[in-house]
Amino acid sequence: MPVNLDAGDGPPSFLDMITTAGYRAATAGLRLGVFPALAEGPLPAAELAARIDADPRGTTLLADVLVSCGYLTADGDRYANAPMADKWLAGGDYRRVEHFWSTVLFDSWGELETSVRSGAAALDFYAWLAERPETLGRFQGMLSAHAEHIAPEVAALVPVGRTLLDVGGGHATYPIRLCSGNPSLHATVVDRPEALNAAAVEAAGVTDRITLRPGDYDELDLGSGFDTALLFNVVHGRTAAANRTLLHRVAAALRPGGAVVLLEHQEHPADPVDDAFTRVFSLNLFHGQCGQVYPAHDIAAWLLDAGFGEPEIHPLESSPAQSVLIARLGGTR
């Protein structure tokens, strides 16, 4: 929650510094367990410190910042969660999102100017994640939870044949849903070994119809004759040249008239908050993977170059900043 300051209260960069410090304090509160500790009611600073196993003076100073930033309220020496902190930070899955993004912004953006200056990623995002198993787990959990949320709408758009290739869909959410609803469908999922979720496939009872292939989908033989290929949240993590090459490889893996289905963020969503987040997300992709959120017309041009027709674009209601793009090999729609 931003500090309630007007633009005339000081230089914009100074106000941003205060709100950034406030957000960092909030993530410290999240990691220390401040918000769950206050979920049952107000506490004096000393008792709050005891609950979270922290220093009383440090806890008081942190809580005072959280009051200024709107995360907590204070009545005398007693602190309480503000309503929005109670809703979003005291419990539930959203805390995973804050844990992940605060780690990304404060730990991985140290060399951001190096990426911007050089035009190349200053760090390898997936190598960075691999060094942080807890953050990697949150990242994979976030992806899976979001996929579960939008899967009903997305799956209804996918043209289903008898065979499906999922490139980069390690959590297997979409093949599981599609195979569960289409008894004759067989799917192959290609992704990094650490991303493949064999447990989810087994739990869904579709191990006989979903094949998991660990490896680099830029190097592996993707096979041939597939009716449909999924590229969900893949192209934004790559350079334009790498995407052109991959789409040619995907085209070679499809039968004539087969369909490729992409799930991507819109470059400029209508909602201003979604638009602001998308710009931050795009910069993060550039910094860690040399990718970005690409304009739909760029993706359409790559598809045409690979032999596909003009894509149909379906904005999602369940995730308004994202769209599904569907194109058929040879231009058949």
Image (cartoon, helix red, strand yellow):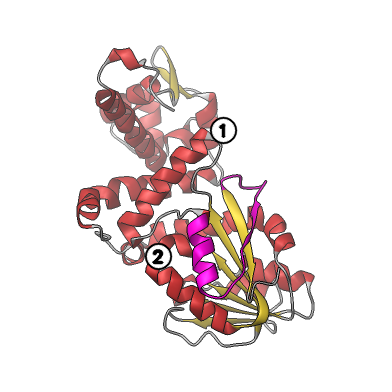
**Mark 2 or mark 1, earlier in chain:** 1
Region of the chain picked out in magenta, as a range: 297-321
- Rendered position, 34 above or below 162: above
**Residue depicted at x 41% and y 26%:** 2
Q: Which residue is mark 2?
A: 240
Q: Nearer the viewer, residue 128 or 314?
A: 314
**Residue depicted at x 61% and y 64%:** 310
Mark 2 or mark 1, which is nearer to you?
2
- Rendered position, 273 above or below 309: above
In the rendered view, does 18 fall on the left or right side of 240? left
Whether residue 316 appears in magenta in the rendering, the answer is yes
Number of the label disc, if any, that sits on residue 87: 1
Q: Secondary structure at mark 2?
A: helix
Residue type at mark 2: give it.
Ala
Whether residue 100 appears in magenta in the rendering, the answer is no
> Can residue 170 be seen in the rendering of this structure?
no
The CA distance from mark 2 to mark 1 is 40 Å
Residue 207 place in picture, x, y as percent? 67, 81
**Residue depicted at x 74% and y 81%:** 162
Q: Nearer the viewer, residue 71 or 253?
A: 253
**How many labels were placed on the picture?**
2
Residue type at mark 1: give it.
Lys
Quadrant of the rendered image containing residue 219: bottom left
